Image (spheres, grey):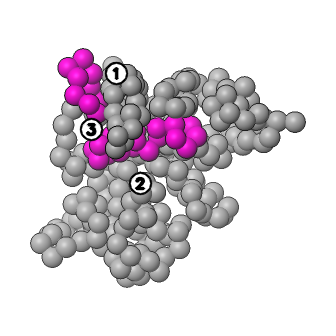
Amino acid sequence: MKEKIIDIHNITAYSGSTKVFSDLSLKIETGCNTVILGPNGSGKSTLLKLLSCELHPVYNPDSHLRIFGRDRWNVMELRRRLGIVSDDLQRDYLPGAHGINVMLSGFYASIDTWQYQEFSNEEREKAESVMAELGIAALKERPFCAMSTGQQRRFLLGRALVHDPDALLFDEPTAGLDIAASLHYLETVRKLMGSDKTVVLVTHHLHEIPPEIERVVLMKGGRIVGDGKKSDMLTSEALSGVFDYPLQVVAVNGYFQLLPAS
């Protein structure tokens, strides 16, 4: 039996005073590359915060939220198993942090590095190695605010990869990137899946779904309204219902795109 990365059973969760989920259940196993797809307001952001331990579900003895089989995690320990690259992190990251410090901050799950933090030679070598793999080593002394959006995204990916996690969770990975940067970044994501990393991708953009994604979870209004194979979920009928707009799905070379239905 494969290990479950995410095991959510009948949870209720709030964002502020708004109830987002009621009796939500979702399981994702190791090796099952998955996209969670839905419009703004469907609950994707709240789900991300639950998985990153920024929010917690309402206590109920008949419900649970487990990540890699555990109900409780120290955040730094969790990052060694599940790397998270989110739009919120990119927006909130300290602008003056140099590239090398962005990488090293992953070891403490912090934003920038601080004087009390110590890094071993092995950790520094790992940070240098990951920067080289991602093609950003030349930017290690550049401030975060002086990088392009694509360069920032690669450093935040590297921040997650310094732990060599088993799984990676991406929040709208190509948001704010131009066409070339988007395709280049998605190629990196595809390589990670090819190296036995399990990827969970959260988005409302069909073009962000790489061919290697096998499973699609459709969300709308805080509920899962579809869950299955990509060929069954990414249909004109299903997505027209999810996005409340008549749509036509076009597939080319394993990628999908949405057009207005004629």
Compare residues 250 and 211 and report the one nearer the observer. Answer: 250
Residue 19: % across, % down: 38, 33
Furthest residue to the right? Answer: 262
- Mark nearer the N terminus (2 vs 3): 3
- Range of residues picked out in magenta: 37-65
In the rendered image, the vertical position of residue 104 relative to residue 39, given as above or below:
below
Q: Which residue is mark 1?
A: 10
In the rendered image, the vertical position of residue 78 relative to residue 116, given as above or below:
above
Q: Quadrant of the C terminus?
A: top right
Callout in the foreground (2, 1): 1
Q: CA distance from mark 2 to mark 1?
A: 26 Å
Looking at numbered disc 3 in the image, what kind of residue is underneath it?
Answer: His
Q: Position of 256 compared to 194: left or right?
A: right
Furthest residue to the top? Answer: 62
Q: CA distance from mark 2 to mark 3?
A: 19 Å
Q: Residue at x 46, y 48 (%)?
A: 170
- Mark nearer the N terminus (2 vs 1): 1
Q: Position of 119 compared to 148: left or right?
A: left
Q: Which residue is mark 3?
A: 56
- Mark nearer the N terminus (1 vs 3): 1
In the rendered image, the vertical position of residue 203 relative to residue 5, given as above or below:
below
Q: Which residue is mark 2?
A: 85
Q: Tell me the SS state at disc 2.
A: strand
Residue 44: % across, % down: 47, 40
